[in-house]
Image: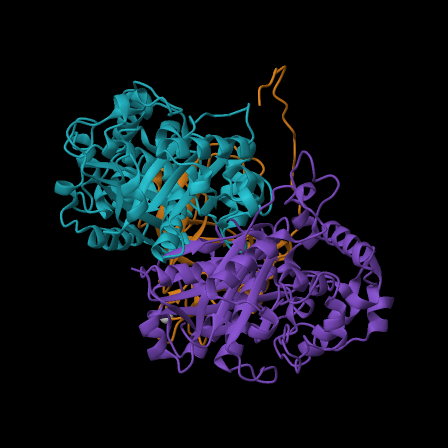
Amino acid sequence: MTDIAIVGAAQTGYRRRIDDANFSEMVYEVTSGALADAGLSIDDIDNFITVSNDFWDGRTISSMAVQDACGSSYQGGRNVSTVEGDGTFGLLYGMMRILSGAYKTTLVVVHCKGSEGNMRQITNGMFDYIYTRPLGIEATAAAAMQARCYMDRYGLTEEDFAHVSVKNRGNARLNPHAQLAAEMTIEDVMTSKMMAAPLKIHDLSPISDGAAAVILADRNTASKLGRKPVWIKGIAHCSEAHYLGDRDLAEAPALRDAAHRAYGMAGVENPFEEIDVVELYDAYSYMEPLWLEELGFCPRGKGGELTRLGATAFDGPVPVNPSGGVLSAHAVLVAGLARVIEATLQIRGEAGERQVEGPVELALAHGINGPCGQSHCVVILGE
Amino acid sequence: MSVHLEENIFYDGRIRMPYKWAVGKTGSFFLTQLRDHARIWGSRCPDCEMVFMPPRKNCPRCLVTDTTWVELPPRGVLETFTVVHFNEPSLQPMKPPYIYGIVKLDGADTGLTHLVNEIEPDSLWPGMRMEAVFKKANQRRGEITDLLYFRPEGGARQ
Amino acid sequence: MSQRVGIIGFGQTYHRSRRDDVNGVELINEAVRAALEDAELTIDDIDAVVIGNMDHFEAVNYVDTWSVDGSGAWMKPLIKLTTGGTTGSTLGIAGYHHTASELFDVVLVIGWEKNSESDTTGAIITCSDPIFDRFSFSGALPGLAVEASTYMKRYGITEEDAALVTVRDREHGANNPYAQLQKPVTVEEVMQSPMLSWPVKLLDICPRSDGAAAVIFAGEQKAKKLSPRPAWVLSTAVRHSHSYFGDINYEEIHTMQEAVKELYKNVGIKEPLKELDVVELYQPYSFAGLKWIEAMGLCKPGESPRLLRDKVTHMDGELPFNPSGGVICTNCIGATGLLRIGEAALQVMGRAPGRQVPDVNLALSTGFGGAYWTDLMLLGSRPW
Ligand SMILES: [Zn+2]
């Protein structure tokens, strides 16, 4: 349990190409949206965290482009910092800066325009340049090797993964922010274009443009606001080895470790029983069952079964990605913070048509960095 | 700001930047041995005794630097693989479909990510024995791709 | 929650114009091992790792996950921050908040750069807006030259005045075995060095370096247990205020003015020249050593050349600047701000052989980058 709450949130719609705004304008939009959501003005914010990536933005010091838009230059300037990585890591650092006693309110804002770069070249750039990059490997080929490794270890099938895509794209139909929403069949996924075996195009998340922002506040400030605060009850992050060959790709020990610590903070003992809704970073369909296993929602190797039996369905006992997840909208960096926002809306009961049944008292949001989920951040949110 | 919009303008840019990355002494030994002798060397940590491929100057787990060289045979076991079908000519080493795999060389504790060839994808299975195929001596340039690819041990299986 | 935080260890590489014998990950590892050795810790004692650099200098995306083998962050909490020139100071400040939040007790912070591996100016130019700025007023030099000429005109400052700053820092750098440039220079040599962008000459600006720095932060109890004299973090202040170079008022450096105002208020400093004991200034070129110290409130605008001529900011002066030789002698950009923090910490801990200022109670370190941004961290010998 921490003393930090999410008191405001906003996100753009996620689209293949947002062509009527540049990314600083998108940052301005969600900054204004989050302030309005919180009932705060920019005067009330004493700390800013921007999240961006120089490769996706096509400029060095990419944070420079958004200092005016996020408000850090307002009235002589305010304290600010910049995280490069998934938005959940920005949330984490923003929270630390309040916990340290330095600030009371923090705006965390993240943007990415996937449409403006070349995803494959950019993700090839995360591999080491001596032994791996010359092979032409990028995110999807690496993920495919992880998917294969996971299938072979535990006997999961391509159909198991297809179930995830069908579920999440189906859920996305209720989410106006989602980019890909569709009523699909297992067969649609199975017969879709092969990208990197065993992954087909419907096993992949799309490339998206989007931005998102949340406002964090300490207990004192949060309790004075009209809106119901959503508390960060637990949070933890962890990274494992870099070389794919150093890792057992059928497992995600870093996620296990982060989950263990986040659960410890939040007092969660049995996630399947206690957590009401989960928003995961499913950049590829196979990731959802793999991450669920490491998060302790089922025994190792049973992630596929969990989906097949409907346990993670919109109306199941633990709805996973009722928003449609990353498979339905993948603005890199933004996607993890979007998970946090979706979890926040569920707890507030403000998720509109995608609100899951029953009171949502505890929700889990998750973000990743690096190839095949090398680094994870787990966030437990609650009333 | 209200805008009477006639069209959305896009601006084409490209960051072209030359880089010259130092491989370092450790990697340079590995790559010159690969280039000049088609030999593969891993590094062993004296503390945890793990043998790393590719070799590391310091053990990534214990951080000690007195790692030692271990020559590894050009053969091992396929851990996982993928068949790439999508096209990305700016990156890809050959025309798809082609295969990436992670091969754990005999005596190493970590796998090497590389290309797999001379086999139909349907015949591949994790656990399969693989062997390295090197470029001809006069074509090797001190790059990881001097090791051309892995193929099933004992030769092509089509 | 929240706890006091002290710096208990600092390690750095021997900075050179190029380090062909190591790759980036190996360079990082040198600094990490040096810091662990300095703090008499092992990697097992580290609870979390913070790392950063400037992406386009080495073209590595996700430097945090790429460098795990060197940083020792395997199966540890790991985060990357980057803010351009201020990256190193941003990292140090993040190390402070990691620890002060009580989420972590011992935190390893790493800043690094291999500037030899690319075209530094070419990379920096891409920080400018691609549509409005990149084709023209772009990169590090034009802004600095405009700032310098504006300042000269307004206060009658001469190029020779600025040369005094280079001469001082090069003299100090000769005492620092880690510095890249260790040979003193004269005012004449500065004046005769090639003109880059008037009035800035080659010896007025920093070099570009390969190097890495690592600083270890610890919570109050741990710091007291692990270090005989930790350097306590007393306050930080940051202003990253501009997006466009055209937005900057070159007559002042308002981010420095605003940041010092906040920092001095936080700790109750009224007369910085008297109260501070040493400053490690992120000073990318000589003119900053004049104008910016005025913005810091050490003297009235236009009066800084007197402080240089009277050697007030020299090693034996009232307030020594850059005992390490500073940025004028070493600039591995992602490490530079963290080197300022590490060197300031050494001064407080009394562990800066050859360049130690006696009896340091308060040491200020700064960071500079982006579109005239300022980061500050004040270290002290007492937790306050
Ligand atoms: Zn070891």
Q: Is residue B46 left or right of residue B24?
A: left
**Residue C43 occupies quadrant:** bottom left
Relative placement, left or right, of A344 versus C214 is: left
Q: Which residue is rendered at x = 86% and y = 72% of the image?
A: C188
Outermost residue to the front:
C270
Which residue is at 44% across, 58% downward? Answer: C94
For the N terminus of chain B, give its image quadrant. Answer: top right
Residue B139: x, y in percent?
A: 63, 53
| Above or below C264: residue A19 | above
Q: Is residue B66 above or below residue A10?
A: below
**Rendered location of residue A156, percent (x, y):** 23, 38
Q: Colour of chain C?
A: purple
> Where does the image place residue C103, in percent across and percent down from the top left?
31, 59
Please determine whether, in this image, residue C255 is positioned above or below residue A344: below
Question: Ligand 1 is located in which of the four quadrants?
Answer: bottom left
Give C137 or C209, whichever is nearer the viewer: C137
Quadrant for the C terminus of chain B in the image? top left
Residue B37 horizontal/vertical position (percent): 56, 64
Residue A78 at least partly seen = yes
Colour of chain A as rendered:
cyan
Left or right: where C342 falls relative to A204? right
- Which chain is in orange here? B
Which of these two is toward me, B26 or C291? C291
